[in-house]
């Protein structure tokens, strides 16, 4: 153990011993002593070391009155509790609050017997036991929170009540300690009053001073400290924000009035002034920086308004930067689009070929003058005719050359070779230019997509954040009441709706299913856990909850590979994308086998990642299509997608070369047909897009052409899906697959995949 930890432990257990001693002396009306054993059991329940606590408790109990009865009672209490605690540790089970109450009764059996044996009234013993049980429960709640979280956090209602009861007991205990007329309770209340006025908010400081004052009343039913302490705090509150010397002087003046004018203390001796003088000296000796540090740490929990302002200012700055960045990508998109030149026209290429043909073939020919001067018109016409045939057929042969030219040209073979070479170069050129232009368009579309994503992100960050302190306090109270230790709660709104609630809870409480229901009850909106992250503080977990969408979805899938193939060309995806949307995509690569599988996997992977990045559907499809068409080989894919919005039940169907899709209602069915070509065939495409609204219980059915083609007609396929009575999407997918195989006599003549999604 490090020196720092050792020092901390020594300080902690020394404090526990002092509290045991004080609380053992504390009595209600000088008769009932319910506090000391309550603190012992509460600390044990909070997993403080029982082997250290037990001798401290026993020693404090004996020293408080030097009574053998108190010693025997403390020994019996600790002995029984050590056995019970050891059993729970061996079993690896935590002591439940309900069981702790039972164990308190069991451990106090000897104490009850000794009290009655020594002549204490059974009524007093009973009241002491009941009050002790209640005090144990209060300190269990308080210590569970304070020992884990500390005081520098928000005061929940439950925590405030428990702290108030504890302060009452401490004040009552201090009232029992008086040496030569020096009142320790008065000293403690005065120090608490002046520190509260300098550090805490007015209401919280007043709450503490009032409770401490009332605590002295509980000891002997004498209210002589209540009025002077409250008057002192009222005067101290008037000097909030001023130099502490004014608070000290104000306290001294009030003390003089309490002694000489109001005669609250029934004495005017110097010993009566001593607590006030010690408090004044103590207040002035402590450096100012410590007051500031304590105030900043405590009031950090109450600075949500400032935090809200800072966050909103930051969001506005981010909004502005994102808009500017979006504009940069938009300008880059325009630049790339302007760079698309397009290939030359066929007439321009023919004229170019004619010039180049003359340059390569006729420039050094001895018959050049005769061909291009004497027979210029005929020669020009013949060469143009040959070039036309080359464009039409892809090449020319000796048979294509007219006799009028062969009779006078000595380079007929060279003529055929040069024309075929030039036409080959044209094809390469056309492909190259087309690919370059397509690449520029592809880059341009991606730049535009990035610009659009940034613009929408900028709009999202522009929404102002509104923190709800009242709701945060209610959630924290309710969680603590339900045995969920929560160190911090942040609730923020956008557009008057609860958007997010972030909790820092004990790691062992993370899996408690009641957390979302508690938050939902307070926010009056169904909440679900969006993320679960490890907190920077050891032993804590951060839960982020958000509004649950109106709908959820379950899936059913069924797939079968073509009988003659080892790999399926079908690939599907079921993923959650932004804003509570589900992407259900099915891609059917041309043919079957490894090549088809590679093509469909590439297409579906591109679609997934574009959607995750937040691109719009039209940009996604155009980019994926161009990626596939630039591959230089026949990489066609049928794409069938449904984008389901769980917030409102809307569905966007996007089909490219896909088969029929269905929306199966309770007793009816709707079809979604496709009229567009697959991906990768041509550089431009017009997908079939249909938007509709679905209801709870509706099922969306997508399948590849291997399934649809197994039915004799679309009508038969539709009727079968409609007449299959089931509420389970997996059963529906299996039934369609079984029927498709049955139609083909048990043989899969093509890859077959079925996706079914059901909203609920």
Image (cartoon, grey):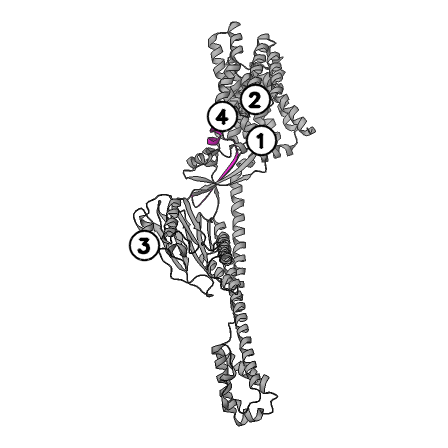
Q: Are marks 4 and 3 in contact (CB under 8 Å)?
A: no
Mark 3 lies on a secondary structure that is: helix
CA–CA distance in space, label 1 to label 2: 35 Å
How much space separates mark 3 and mark 1, taking CA atoms?
83 Å
**Residue 190 covered by magenta stretch:** no
Q: Are marks 1 and 4 in contact (CB under 8 Å)?
A: no
Mark 3 or mark 1: name the one nearer the start of the chain: 1
Whole-number angstrom distance, CA of label 4 to CA of label 3: 71 Å
Q: Which residue is mark 3?
A: 716
Question: Which residue is the site of mark 4?
Answer: 161
Q: Say what secondary structure mark 2 lies in.
A: helix
User: Can you give x and y, in whole percent of width and height, for residue 362 in the image?
Assistant: 58, 87
* Disc on the earlier residue, 2 or 3: 2
Q: Residues within 10 Å of mark 2 (few under 14, many from 20)?
A: many
**Cα distance in 3D space between marks 1 and 4:** 22 Å
Residue 46: image quadrant is top right
Q: Nearer the viewer, mark 4 or mark 3?
A: 3
The image quadrant where one finds the C terminus is top left
Give the residue pinned by disc 1. Answer: 198
Query: Residue 315 location in percent, x, y?
Result: 52, 49
Q: Give the residue number, with chain letter if any, for mark 2.
A: 44
Find out whether residue 481 is within the magenta segment: yes
């Amino acid at each position: 153990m490090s020196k720092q930890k050792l020092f901390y432990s020594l300080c902690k257990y020394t404090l526990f011993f002092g509290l045991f001693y004080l609380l053992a002396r504390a009595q209600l009306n000088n008769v009932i002593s319910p506090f000391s054993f309550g603190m012992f059991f509460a600390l044990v329940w909070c997993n403080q070391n029982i082997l250290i606590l037990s001798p401290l408790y026993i020693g404090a109990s004996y020293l408080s009155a030097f009574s053998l009865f108190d010693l025997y009672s403390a020994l019996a209490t600790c002995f029984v509790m050590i056995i019970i605690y050891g059993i729970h540790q061996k079993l690896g089970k935590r002591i439940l609050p309900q069981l702790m109450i039972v164990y308190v009764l069991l451990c106090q059996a000897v104490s009850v017997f000794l009290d009655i044996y020594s002549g204490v009234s059974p009524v007093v013993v009973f009241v002491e036991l009941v009050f002790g049980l209640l005090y144990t429960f209060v300190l269990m709640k308080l210590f569970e929170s304070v020992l884990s979280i500390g005081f520098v956090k928000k005061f929940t209602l439950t925590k405030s009540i428990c702290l108030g009861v504890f302060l009452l007991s401490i004040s009552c205990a201090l009232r029992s300690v008086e040496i030569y007329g020096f009142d320790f309770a008065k000293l403690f209340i005065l120090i608490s009053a002046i520190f509260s006025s300098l550090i805490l908010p007015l209401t919280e400081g007043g709450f503490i001073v009032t409770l401490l004052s009332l605590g002295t009343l509980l000891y002997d039913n004498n209210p002589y400290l209540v009025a002077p302490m409250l008057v002192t705090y009222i005067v101290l509150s008037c000097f909030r924000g001023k130099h502490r010397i004014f608070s000290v002087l104000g306290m001294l003046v009030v003390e003089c009035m309490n002694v000489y004018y109001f005669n609250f203390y029934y004495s005017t001796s110097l010993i009566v002034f001593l607590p006030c003088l010690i408090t004044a000296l103590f207040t002035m000796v402590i450096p100012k920086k410590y007051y500031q540090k304590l105030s900043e740490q405590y009031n950090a929990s109450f600075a949500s308004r400032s935090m809200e302002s800072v966050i909103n200012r930051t969001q506005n700055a981010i909004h502005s930067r994102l808009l500017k960045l979006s504009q940069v990508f938009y300008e880059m998109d325009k630049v790339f689009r302007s760079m698309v030149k397009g290939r030359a026209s066929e007439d321009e290429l023919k004229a170019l070929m004619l010039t180049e043909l003359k340059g390569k073939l006729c420039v050094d020919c001895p018959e050049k003058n005769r061909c291009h001067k004497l027979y210029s018109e005929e020669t020009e016409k013949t060469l143009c005719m040959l070039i036309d045939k080359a464009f039409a057929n892809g090449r020319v042969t000796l048979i294509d050359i007219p006799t009028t030219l062969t009779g006078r040209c000595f380079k007929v073979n060279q003529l055929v070779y040069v024309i075929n070479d030039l036409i080959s170069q044209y094809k390469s050129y056309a492909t190259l230019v087309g690919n370059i232009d397509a690449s520029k368009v592809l880059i341009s579309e991606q730049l535009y997509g990035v610009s659009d994503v940034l613009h929408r992100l900028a709009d999202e960050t522009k929404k102002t954040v509104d923190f709800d302190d009242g709701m945060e306090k209610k959630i924290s109270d309710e969680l603590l009441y339900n045995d969920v230790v929560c160190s911090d709660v942040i609730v923020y709104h956008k557009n008057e709706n609860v958007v997010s609630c972030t909790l820092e809870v004990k790691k062992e409480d993370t899996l408690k299913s009641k957390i979302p229901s508690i938050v939902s009850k307070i926010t009056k909106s169904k909440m679900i856990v969006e993320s679960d992250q490890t907190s920077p503080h050891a032993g804590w977990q951060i839960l982020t909850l958000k509004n649950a969408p109106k709908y959820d979805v379950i899936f059913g899938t069924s797939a079968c590979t073509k009988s003659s193939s080892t790999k399926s060309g079908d690939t599907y995806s079921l993923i959650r994308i932004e804003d509570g949307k589900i992407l259900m995509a099915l891609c059917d690569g041309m043919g079957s086998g490894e090549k088809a599988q590679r093509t469909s996997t590439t297409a579906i992977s591109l679609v997934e990642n574009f959607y995750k990045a937040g691109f719009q559907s039209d940009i996604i499809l155009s980019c994926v299509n161009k990626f596939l068409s630039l591959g230089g080989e026949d990489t066609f894919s049928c794409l069938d997608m449904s984008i389901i919005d769980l917030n409102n039940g809307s569905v966007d169907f996007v089909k490219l070369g896909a088969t029929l899709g269905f929306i199966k209602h309770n007793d009816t069915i709707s079809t979604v047909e496709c009229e567009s070509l697959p991906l990768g065939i041509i550089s431009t495409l017009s997908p079939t897009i249909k938007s509709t609204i679905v209801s709870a219980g509706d099922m969306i059915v997508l399948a590849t052409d291997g399934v649809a083609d197994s039915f004799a007609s679309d009508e038969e396929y539709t009727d079968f899906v409609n007449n299959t009575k089931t509420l389970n999407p997996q059963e529906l997918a299996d039934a369609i697959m079984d029927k498709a195989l049955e139609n083909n006599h048990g043989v899969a003549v093509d890859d077959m995949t079925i996706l079914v999604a059901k909203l609920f």
